[in-house]
């Protein structure tokens, strides 16, 4: 997983509330278990018409927003089903930070496990940041100092210390397990010596 330290981008803005995971990545894209290639399905039913052609006025189909690394969204973002494909699609599209006043819990936690920083802040700040999106001005995310920098302002945000550590060090669940590999090997060796019958194959 790529380390997340600082991020600077012109943000894209979706004002819709209650954007669920089916809107983020529709069910027809859930056949794969690969984390790559899902960017094409991100917000598919909003980005494309019934003939598969781009809807030109949808924000992520326009410049500079199609290159945004930061998404500002309406409240309760990521509600609905628990599909992990939703953060996969966002990340594959190039978005590694989502800012909203509220998130669905499962989506929020899935983001951290997949290298995306979800930032919960006051709705007033969300709307203020949205103005920077409309003016096509960059904002900066500084995870170490837990700050959003925009214009001449700095806005602090809260993040769980363990989740912050995982993002900054690029640690997903597999990498966290591998950090304990010596302890795992030692445990398995002890079990093999003390209870060998547990490891026998039928």
Image (cartoon, helix red, strand yellow):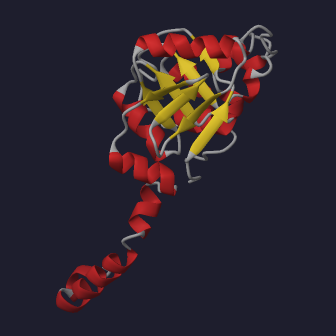
In-front residue for pair 2/27: 2
> Horizontal placement of 37 versus 24: left or right?
right
Q: Can residue 26 be seen in this view?
A: no
State the image coordinates of residue 45 (x, y, percent, origin top left): 66, 15
Q: For the point 78% across and 22% down, which residue is it?
A: 64
Q: In which quarter of the image is the N terminus?
A: bottom right
Q: In which quarter of the image is the C terminus?
A: bottom left
Specify the quadrant of the image occupied by residue 187. Answer: bottom left
Q: Can residue 35 be seen in this view?
A: yes
Outermost residue on the bottom side: it is 193
In the picture shown, does residue 74 fall above or below 7?
A: above
Q: In which quarter of the image is residue 136?
A: top right
Q: Which of 187 and 29 is in front in this view?
A: 187
Q: Which residue lies furthest to the left in this view?
A: 194
Residue at x 39% of width, y 65% of height: 177
Residue 124 in percent (x, y) is at 44, 10
Query: Which image quadrant for residue 200?
Result: bottom left
Rendered location of residue 189, percent (x, y): 29, 87
The image position of residue 119, as x and y in percent, is: 45, 30
Lateral position of residue 31 relative to residue 48, left or right: left
Q: Which residue is drawn at 41% across and 22% down?
A: 121
């Amino acid at each position: 997983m790529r380390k997340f330290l600082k991020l600077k981008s012109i943000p894209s803005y979706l004002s819709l509330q209650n954007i669920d995971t089916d809107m983020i990545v529709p069910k027809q894209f859930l056949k794969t278990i690969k984390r790559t290639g899902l960017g094409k399905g991100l917000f598919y039913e909003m980005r494309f018409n019934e003939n598969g052609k781009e809807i030109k006025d949808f924000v992520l189909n326009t410049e500079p927003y199609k290159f945004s690394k930061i998404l500002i969204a309406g409240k309760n973002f990521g509600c609905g089903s628990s599909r992990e494909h939703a953060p996969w699609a966002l990340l594959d599209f190039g978005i590694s930070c989502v800012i909203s006043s509220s998130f669905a819990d499962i989506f929020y936690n899935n983001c951290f496990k997949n290298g995306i920083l979800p930032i919960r802040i006051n709705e007033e700040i969300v709307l203020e940041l949205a103005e920077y999106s409309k003016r096509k001005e960059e904002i900066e995310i500084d995870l170490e100092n837990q700050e959003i920098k925009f214009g001449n302002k700095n806005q602090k945000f809260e993040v769980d210390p363990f989740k912050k550590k995982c993002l900054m060090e690029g640690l997903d669940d597999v990498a966290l397990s591998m950090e304990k590999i010596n302890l795992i090997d030692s445990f398995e060796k002890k079990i093999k010596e003390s209870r060998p019958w547990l490891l026998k194959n039928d």
